[in-house]
Amino acid sequence: MPLTCIDVVSFGYLHAAPPDAHLTLDLRRHFRDPHVDPALRHQSARDLPVRRAVLATPGIRELITAAALLADAYDAGPSGAPLTIAVGCAGGRHRAATVASVLAARLGKTGMTVHLTHRDLDKPVIDR
């Protein structure tokens, strides 16, 4: 029985605890943060320069592919229970929101029902 739906949630660890999820992708330590670039700091995943910077980061596309394969593995299981995939970074505006958006779009193309939520995308930039 295929999954009834997949919830993909982006979030920022600096805003609140991670959401409950079956899979959580923590992008904080392994992938370059666009926040360090002053030109990108106050932009978000809604802005093309941010999306380009995140998707050009070595390993990001492979991570998205691996996450999609993990969703496929859950889908192959005997239960049709919903699956939640959380994608987190420091503030939830750049890396997490971009990766979650691309992952959700990719999963949606397979015929799965996908709901995308950006928990912290519209919250203020955190000065750090």
Image (cartoon, rainbow, N blue to C red):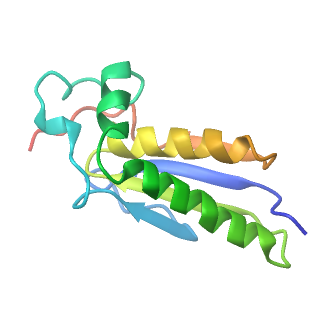
Q: Where does residue 41 sit, x and y in percent of width and height?
A: 18, 29
Residue 119: % across, % down? 46, 43
Q: Residue at x 70, y 64 (%)?
A: 72
Snapshot quadrant of residue 53:
top left
Residue shown at the point (54%, 60%) measured from the top left: 67
- Can residue 44 be seen from the camera position used here? no
Q: Where residue 92 appears, x then y in whole percent?
A: 35, 44
**Is 122 or 41 nearer to us in this picture?**
41
Considering depth in this image, is 6 or 57 the residue closer to the camera?
Answer: 57
Locate residue 99 relative to residue 80 in the image: left or right: left
Q: Quadrant of the C terminus?
A: top left
Residue drawn where x is 84% and y is 69% of the image? 80
Residue in view at x 70 percent, y 55 percent: 6
How far from the left and from the top, in percent, is residue 2? 86, 64
Of the pair 89 and 121, the residue shown nearer to us: 89
Q: For residue 43, what is the image quadrant?
A: top left
Kindly tell me whether residue 58 is visible in this rendering. Answer: yes
Q: Is residue 109 left or right of residue 94?
A: right
Query: Please, is residue 27 above or below residue 61 in the view?
Result: below
Q: Please determine whether, in this image, residue 57 is positioned above or below residue 6.
A: above
**Seen from this angle, which residue lies furthest right?**
1
In the displayed structure, 75 sits above or below 54; it is: below
**Which quadrant would residue 117 be assigned to in this image?**
top right
Query: How many numbered circles does the render carry?
Result: 0
Horizontal side, residue 15 vs residue 99: left or right? left
Report the front residue among 58 and 105. 58
Quadrant location of the N terminus in the rendered image: bottom right
Horizontally, is 2 left or right of 15 in the view?
Answer: right
Task: Indicate whether 80 appears above or below 104.
Answer: below
